[in-house]
Image: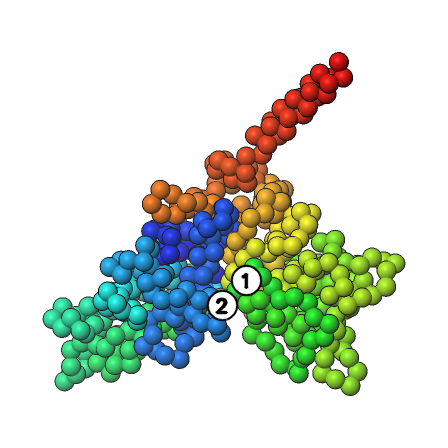
């Protein structure tokens, strides 16, 4: 699970400040307040790690990627190429990561890791940025739970040869191979030690566990955008297992069919359900339909989605029911389809949904983070961008009634500032109250009510005057 993030000089963010990411992390705020940028930044890191071009420091995106951020100058704060894009990322592995110094045979083990990097342009017209330096840290908790640095390793500018890089390490001593040249080539992407590091130092191979672990973490990032694909009357499926439902939910039927044999339960001690039955239950619990079925079309590899709106209505094809059903289905499938220990970024899951269904989304997401499969916790983390007051209010209620722990929810409010975007943490107490509610968070409702009453009084007076 990703535990912390801080971004500097990215789009409208001069500095987000430290962000604590919990199992459920929600970003609220008005339009153009930078909510989506945070998830976009994380997805840019993933698509960079996926890029086969190891010399590409950042992959801003194209038509085939979840996000497309344009040129490096486009993603910099103020489009200022003299600025450095920097960030720090913290995460916790479900199992300890082990490092062993092959020279001293000393071992290091921990679940908590951190990474930070600085990236800048090579010149005013540069399109391909360079990684100035990066640093990994392996941490372990002390008796009081405070995280202490156990091992550090990274790359930075060479002291004597500015075009080269140097390898740094704290925790054990690097032993250089005799006769090898000084200075390393540039990092791989923004996070990788070049192959030469393992040749120039006898024990640098130990450090390769750091980028391997970060790459695995980034590969567990999944994204679902705000505009999901329109429903279709037929869906083709040839038996493949999609990696995810897709950025617009285009693979949700294939994912559901591929997962039919999976069994899950909503928490320890709860009854197991088949995957399709689980999705159908949530559609019914949200009050959207009565029943749901994906069935093959005889003689083809196509499938159709049949739904029954009420107990007494006839089954119909999914395009013939309310648009909200097709928009929530990719959200439901992705939440339970993603592999264990994944982070799912969802933009505006409430689009096209009735307020009562928006409330139910909070209950859905609470069940998702508590869900289990094959007797083990799935460890799913949700990062959500939302405008829904109804969703937030139900989430507050679930904190108050202890359905979800307060520490398992992290909420932030994004807003334009005088010079840059401003991120404010919403303090939720044990009773679900937000103790630092921002002004006009969901609009000035009290003013609207007062103005409505005032308008009503004026109309009544005008009516009385006309009657006399």
Judge the density around disc 2: few (<14), some (14-19), many (≥20) Cα neighbours within 10 Å: many
As drawn, the residue found furthest toward the top would be 468
Q: Position of residue 274 (x, y in %)?
A: 71, 68
Q: Mark 1–mark 2 contact, CB under 8 Å?
A: yes
In the displayed structure, would residue 301 be above or below residue 343?
Answer: below
Count of numbered badges drawn on the protein: 2
The quadrant of the picture occupied by the C terminus is top right
Q: Position of residue 308 (x, y in %)?
A: 81, 62
Q: What residue is at 29 percent from the left and 81 percent from the top?
A: 195
Q: Secondary structure at mark 1?
A: loop
Viewer-side residue, 15 vs 178: 15
Q: Position of residue 326 (x, y in %)?
A: 68, 63
The label shown at residue 225 is 1
Residue behind mark 2:
66
Viewer-side residue, 52 vs 230: 230
Q: Position of residue 2 (x, y in %)?
A: 45, 59
In the displayed structure, would residue 394 be above or below residue 310?
Answer: above
As drawn, the residue found furthest toward the right would be 312
């Amino acid at each position: 699970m990703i535990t912390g993030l801080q971004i500097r000089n990215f789009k409208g963010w001069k500095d987000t400040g430290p962000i604590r990411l919990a199992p459920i992390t929600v970003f609220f705020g008005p339009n153009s307040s930078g909510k989506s940028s945070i998830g976009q930044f994380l997805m840019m890191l993933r698509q960079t790690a996926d890029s086969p071009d190891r010399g590409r420091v950042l992959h801003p995106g194209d038509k085939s990627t979840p996000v497309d951020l344009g040129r490096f100058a486009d993603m910099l704060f103020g489009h200022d190429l003299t600025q450095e894009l920097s960030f720090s990322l913290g995460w916790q592995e479900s199992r300890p990561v082990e490092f062993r110094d092959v020279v001293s045979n000393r071992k290091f083990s921990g679940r908590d890791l951190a990474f930070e990097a600085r990236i800048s342009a090579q010149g005013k017209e540069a399109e391909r940025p360079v990684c100035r330096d990066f640093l990994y840290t392996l941490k372990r908790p002390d008796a009081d739970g405070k995280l202490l640095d156990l091992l550090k390793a990274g790359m930075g500018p060479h002291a004597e040869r500015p075009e080269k890089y140097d390898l740094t390490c704290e925790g054990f001593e690097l032993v250089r191979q005799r006769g090898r040249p000084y200075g390393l080539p540039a990092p791989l992407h923004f996070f990788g030690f070049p192959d030469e590091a393992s040749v120039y130092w006898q024990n640098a191979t130990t450090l390769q566990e750091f980028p391997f672990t970060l790459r695995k973490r980034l590969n567990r990032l999944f994204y679902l955008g705000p505009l999901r694909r329109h429903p279709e009357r037929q869906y083709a499926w040839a038996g493949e297992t999609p990696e995810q439902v897709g950025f617009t939910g285009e693979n949700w039927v294939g994912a559901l069919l591929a997962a039919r044999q999976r069994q899950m339960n909503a928490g320890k001690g709860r009854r197991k359900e088949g995957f399709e039955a689980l999705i159908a239950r949530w559609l019914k619990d949200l009050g959207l339909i009565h029943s749901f079925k994906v069935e093959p079309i005889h003689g083809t590899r196509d499938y159709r989605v049949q739904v029954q709106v009420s107990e007494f209505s006839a089954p119909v094809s999914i395009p013939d029911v309310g648009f909200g059903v097709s928009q929530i289905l990719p959200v439901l499938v992705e939440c339970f389809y993603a592999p264990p220990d994944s982070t799912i970024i969802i933009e505006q899951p409430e689009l096209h949904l009735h307020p009562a269904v928006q409330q139910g989304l909070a209950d859905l997401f609470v069940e998702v983070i508590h869900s289990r499969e094959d007797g083990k916790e799935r460890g799913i983390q949700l990062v959500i961008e939302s405008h829904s007051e109804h969703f937030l209010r139900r989430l507050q209620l679930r904190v108050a009634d202890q359905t979800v722990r307060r520490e398992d929810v992290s909420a932030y409010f994004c807003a334009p500032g005088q010079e840059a975007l401003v991120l404010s943490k919403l303090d939720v107490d044990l009773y679900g109250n937000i103790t630092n509610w921002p002004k006009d968070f969901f609009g000035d409702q009290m003013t609207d009510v007062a103005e409505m009453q005032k308008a009503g009084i004026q109309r009544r007076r005008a009516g009385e005057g006309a009657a006399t």
